[in-house]
Image (cartoon, helix red, strand yellow):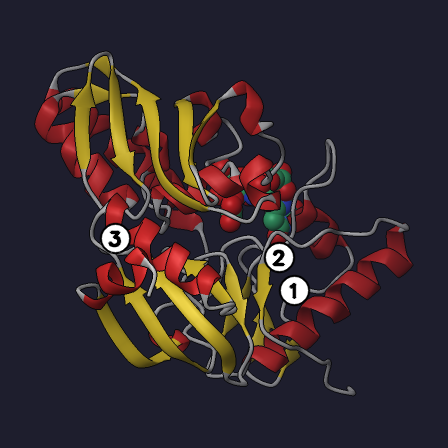
Amino acid sequence: MHKSDSAVKSVIKEENFNFSKHTTYGLGGTAKVAYFPKTEEEAVAVYKYLKNNDERFIVLGKGSNLLVSDSDFDGSVICTSCLRGIEFEGNSLKILSGTTVNQLLTFCIRNGITGFEYLAGIPASIGGLAIMNGGTSDRRISSNILSVVVFDGKIREISNKNCNFGNKHSTMSDIDAIILAIYAGFEREKPATVKKNINEFLEKRKHQPRGKSCGCVFKNPNGLSAGRLIDEAGLKGLKIGGAEVSREHANFIVNNGGSAREVYSLIKAVKKSVYEKTGINLEEEVIYIGEFNELNC
Ligand code: EPU
């Protein structure tokens, strides 16, 4: 028996894990088991255990950028939602990967920390933001990150430069590893000002579509807006079953009681139509988990 096998015994587990309760789309089948490590040590133990047993698995943060197939996932899930916490370490903050934007901003208000307010309203975990270099069109998490701590068989600290942050992409998107934490720089500000800044960013996001979605489905092509291209192709309001191209922002596909297959088919239909009209091949920002095939519409 490996050492990690016994360490995994004390980790919280959920059998028949239902993705639809853990994704912002509210979609997806089940996985046989999900692990909820609370510490970096537990996360490492679960990762090692699954690797040693040749188990297929995915790491799940807030599930806000995922489309999970309706069919059951033949593997396990490492959920980072309990792997949360923030500590001062010298001149930086160490933020565990499952910490949510809301938890981070509450900490920032309480401790008078500025620089993260632009994240307000993004339904993401810090690990998810780091992988995708998430943020807004003005500022991304790469501007805060000093380094990212991952485990890929060994604990490694990847410097900001070596993270190769790009457009909704980073080194962490391409490696087989679990993000444990990030180190971020910070500055001081009066709590009342931090709170005011957060409210201003929340106000800006008020116009974003409501309803179940994964945020923007496609990356913005260089210098262009995917939302505008889809809008100009006349696709707002296009529906397949319960999936609909939002009338408020065309880069959002909302789920009104549909299936993952319907959302997937609509994404592919939008992609095809924009390509036929403009010659531009939109690239998905949303990450697919599981097997998909399109409906014949
Ligand atoms: N536009 C349209 N029609 C639409 C949508 C947009 O004409 O249906 C036009 C807007 O009028 C504007 C331009 O396209 O002139 C850009 O639109 P917007 O300001 O909404 O920004 P975006 O590029 O579509 C990006 C991020 C969003 C983020 C916003 C605000 C990407 C793919 N999208 O959207 O992020 O919320 O800026 O900072 O990077 C996400 O990450 O999931 C996401 C939604």
Residue type, numbered disc 1: Lys
Is ligand 1 closer than 8 angstroms to the Cβ of mark 3? no
Question: Left or right of 195: which side holds 50?
Answer: right
Give the residue at x 24% y 12%.
Answer: 91
- Give the labeled residue for mark 1: 236
Assign a secondary structure to mark 2: loop
Residue type, numbered disc 2: Ala
**Dividing the image into four equal quarters, which quarter contains ligand 1?**
top right
Q: How many residues crowd around disc 1 within 10 Å: few (fewer than 14), some, or many (20 or more)?
A: many
Kindly tell me whether residue 290 is visible in this rendering: yes
The reply to whether callout 2 and callout 3 are in contact (CB within 8 Å) is no
- Which is nearer the N-term, disc 2 or disc 1? 1
Q: Give me the C-alpha separation between circle 2 and circle 1.
A: 6 Å
Is ligand 1 closer than 8 angstroms to the Cβ of mark 1? yes
- Which is nearer the N-term, disc 3 or disc 1? 3
x then y, percent, for residue 118: 36, 31
